[in-house]
């Protein structure tokens, strides 16, 4: 307190000067219409800029929750789109039989849920991805993982709160895919190195393609439905593999920027696999 009093006494002339200046400005603005209008204009400009900066900061801080809400909505829309696709297929089948039936909820084969990447690698021979959700969220091994841009991989193992994903950037993971326009299919295989490119192998030698053709999942795997984007053909590889042809594919998914993903569950996967195993026996 004594220091404050000493400071005021020592700088009293400056404090008096500041008070008189402030009083003069107040009187000038209060008694002069022109000065008042200028002051209000400057005040509004400064206040507007402060509010703009404040809103920008607030929007940035809310980006994470906004992205999560968007991904949740996208997951619901993806599942809804799959339901519509299934409905169209059923209607087409019914029309062929000269009758019309409508799909019910039991006809929807897939359930889609959002998740966030908490760990990721792209430059190893065997890359892995960790998601922030696990068995308590309904996640199970052999569920597919993708983004709106393209395929990511498949869940390998889960704990109560986390899941480990084998991405297509893993030399042991092979995904059945097709060329969109010709429907020739092969196996997506990554040989390491470049995380942006992989190979579509096992195509018949007579398979036709053009650079720029889209590669999609073909639905032969019970993990992914038909039509999930994978990548685009860049060209053929000159390899002596007998009757097979290999294509270089540029992936749609940018694994170096992966943050939000969607997990897809085939509700009837176990039924399909058990039936197929019974036939093989």
Image (spheres, grey):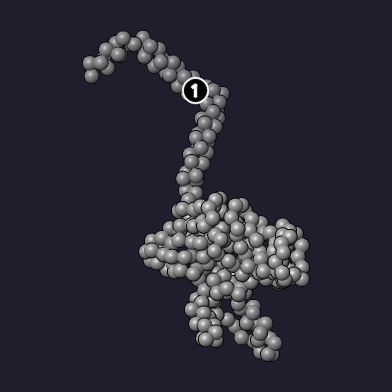
Q: How many marks?
A: 1
Residue at image position (61%, 63%) is 189
Question: Which residue appears farthest toward the bottom when viewing the image?
Answer: 98
Most foreground residue, 41 or 12: 12
Residue 207 at x, y percent in the picture: 75, 70
Residue 200 at x, y percent in the picture: 66, 64
Most foreground residue, 276 or 64: 276
Task: Classify 218 as above or below 4.
Answer: below
Q: Is residue 126 visible?
A: yes
Secondary structure beneath dot 1 equals helix
Residue 132 at x, y percent in the picture: 43, 58
Relative placement, left or right, of 40 versus 244 is left
Residue at image position (71%, 62%) is 239
Residue 125 at x, y percent in the picture: 54, 55
Residue at image position (51%, 65%) is 154
Quadrant in which the N terminus is drawn = top left
Q: Residues within 10 Å of mark 1 (few under 14, many from 20)?
A: some
Task: Classify 18 as above or below 164.
Answer: above
Relative placement, left or right, of 266 versus 243 is left
Task: Classify 51 as above or below 250.
Answer: above
Residue at image position (56%, 54%) is 255
**Residue position for label 1:** 29
Most foreground residue, 195 or 246: 246
Relative placement, left or right, of 22 versus 144 is left
* Residue 92, quarter of picture: bottom right
Q: Is residue 262 visible?
A: no
């Amino acid at each position: 307190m004594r220091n404050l009093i000493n400071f005021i006494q020592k700088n009293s002339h400056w404090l008096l000067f500041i008070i008189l200046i402030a009083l003069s400005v107040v009187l000038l603005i209060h008694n002069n219409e022109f000065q008042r209008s200028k002051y209000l204009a400057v005040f509004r400009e400064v206040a507007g800029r402060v509010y703009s900066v404040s809103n920008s900061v607030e929007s940035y801080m809310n980006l994470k929750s906004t992205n999560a809400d968007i991904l949740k909505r996208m997951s619901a829309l993806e599942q809804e789109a799959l339901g519509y696709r299934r409905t169209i297929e059923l209607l087409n089948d019914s029309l062929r039989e000269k009758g019309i039936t409508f799909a019910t909820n039991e006809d929807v084969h897939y359930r889609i849920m959002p998740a966030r990447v908490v760990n990721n690698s792209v430059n190893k021979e065997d890359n892995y991805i960790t998601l922030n959700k696990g068995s308590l969220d309904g996640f199970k091994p052999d569920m597919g993982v993708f983004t709106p841009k393209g395929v990511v991989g498949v869940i390998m193992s889960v704990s109560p709160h986390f899941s480990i994903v084998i991405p297509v950037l893993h030399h042991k993971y092979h995904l059945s895919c097709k060329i969109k326009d010709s429907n020739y299919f092969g196996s997506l295989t990554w040989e390491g190195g470049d995380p942006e490119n992989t190979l579509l192998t096992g195509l018949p030698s007579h398979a036709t393609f053009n650079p720029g053709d889209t590669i999609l999942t073909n639905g032969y795997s019970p993990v992914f439905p038909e039509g999930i984007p994978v990548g685009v053909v860049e060209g053929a590889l000159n390899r002596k593999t007998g009757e097979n042809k290999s294509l270089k594919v540029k992936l749609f998914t940018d694994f170096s920027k992966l943050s939000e993903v969607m997990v897809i569950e085939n509700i009837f996967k176990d039924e399909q696999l058990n039936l197929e195993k019974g036939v093989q026996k």
